[in-house]
Amino acid sequence: MFYDSLPFRAVAADVLLAVENGQSLSQCLPYALSQLPPEQRPQLQAICYGTCRWFHRLDGELNQRLKKPIRKPDRVIHHLMLVALFQLRFSEQATYAVLNETVEACRALDRPHLTGLVNGVLRAAEREGAPEPSDDSSRFSHPVWMVEKLRHNWPEHWQAILDANNTQAPMTLRVNALRFSRDEYLKLLTDAGIGAKATRFAPLGIQLERPVPVDNLPWFEDGAVSVQDEAAQLCTTLMDLQPGQRVLDACAAPGGKTCAILESCAELSEVIAIDESQDRLPRVQENLDRLDLSASLIQADAADTEQWWDGQAFDRILLDVPCSATGVIRRHPDIKLLRRESDIVPLAGIQLGLLNAMWSILKPGGRLVYATCSVFPQENHRIIQRFLKQQEHAQLIPIDASWGLDMDAGRNLLPDPNSHDGFFYAVLEKPDA
């Protein structure tokens, strides 16, 4: 579709249709943004993310207002009305502009026969206000299966998790300790007029009062800091990195943790970063280049060690496995539309397979840190429990920390609206022969 000829609401509707059809925002939004004038891009991004965030509530309202579903060939108009409802319910956009311009966008999408429906539904929505949510899926704006799974897994925390997922995550930085101390960089931010504070748990983390373009951050292009959530930063505090060690970052893209490892200990003998995605590895190299760091990058399935491993065992392995990403929904609200309950069992199989493969290339006396950005126990401490039954000599190292909840086999951080994402960590050591 040629987006440069469409109103931005029509573009947003087409992007959301692509998400419903299985593409992530990170896949389909960049092209759409590139086709619009620069002044419209922030609004398009905000609308796409916001409509995904509140999709299940908005969809519930729209379905109540429609006498019958819109035909599949015209499905883009359903999403156009969701965009308008998002603006009516969650933005300060003038009502008349939302109504009139949405009708015009309907025409621009070559659906003039639906302008009357669009106009009638949106005028009723504006006149009557938002209805009471009909169920928990609408109330918390999450898919039914996710609400029920969280209720079952976290009976004392499920509502807080759902509420946190609907907030906008703070912008958090990791200071490059090879360049500055955290206090030094906090002063640079103060001098630049950027409000910030130290994170509670990550020793090099800084949380900004409000997001800013990275170009506004002092010395960003020279590698002073990186953007990384506080929970993700904790990996290096668990790895016990020492000079001379050979370190593997499995499933490494986009490279934030690879860079954090290199910044944490300048005298490591070698760091290898592997990722299966050919498309994502260049991002790892870009991050390394900006920070003036060096690692060996390999495009491979980490679990297929015969394909890439040179036979030299690793002292330390960080295994940040592919997962449901349910701990980072506030940063990636399209997960609510893309993820299916049927994904969890296959993901757990991949996670356990990777863990066993990485264990086989860990040195005796070596340490493996297992990580996910999931809040589902099926991908977290239950994987570790299953692994420990298979590998009777593996030692689980208790994590002595003030963050997260002790799950007996690792610690789980739940998303905090004022702080970190949801994350899980477990530490395993291989006995020295």
Image: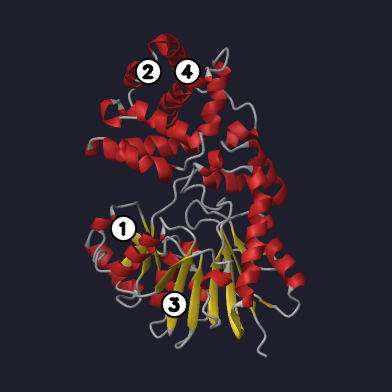
Q: Earlier in the sequence, mark 3 or mark 1?
A: 1
Q: Earlier in the sequence, mark 1 or mark 2?
A: 2
Quarter holding residue 265: bottom left
Horizontal side, residue 185 vs residue 400: left or right: left
Residue type marked 1: Gly
Q: Residues within 10 Å of mark 3 (few under 14, many from 20)?
A: many
**Residue nearest the observer in this picture, 253 or 217:** 253
Residue indicated by mark 3: 271
Horizontal side, residue 306 vs residue 153: left or right: left
Determine the residue positioned at 45% across, 74% down: 272
Residue 301, horizontal then vertical, whole percent: 54, 63
Q: Secondary structure at mark 4?
A: helix
Residue 285, horizontal then vertical, whole percent: 35, 66
Gap between marks 3 and 2, in whole Å? Answer: 53 Å
Residue indicated by mark 2: 106
Q: Which mark is residue 195?
A: 1
Q: Secondary structure at mark 2?
A: helix
Gap between marks 1 and 2, in whole Å? Answer: 42 Å
Residue indicated by mark 4: 125
Q: How is the image coloured?
A: secondary structure
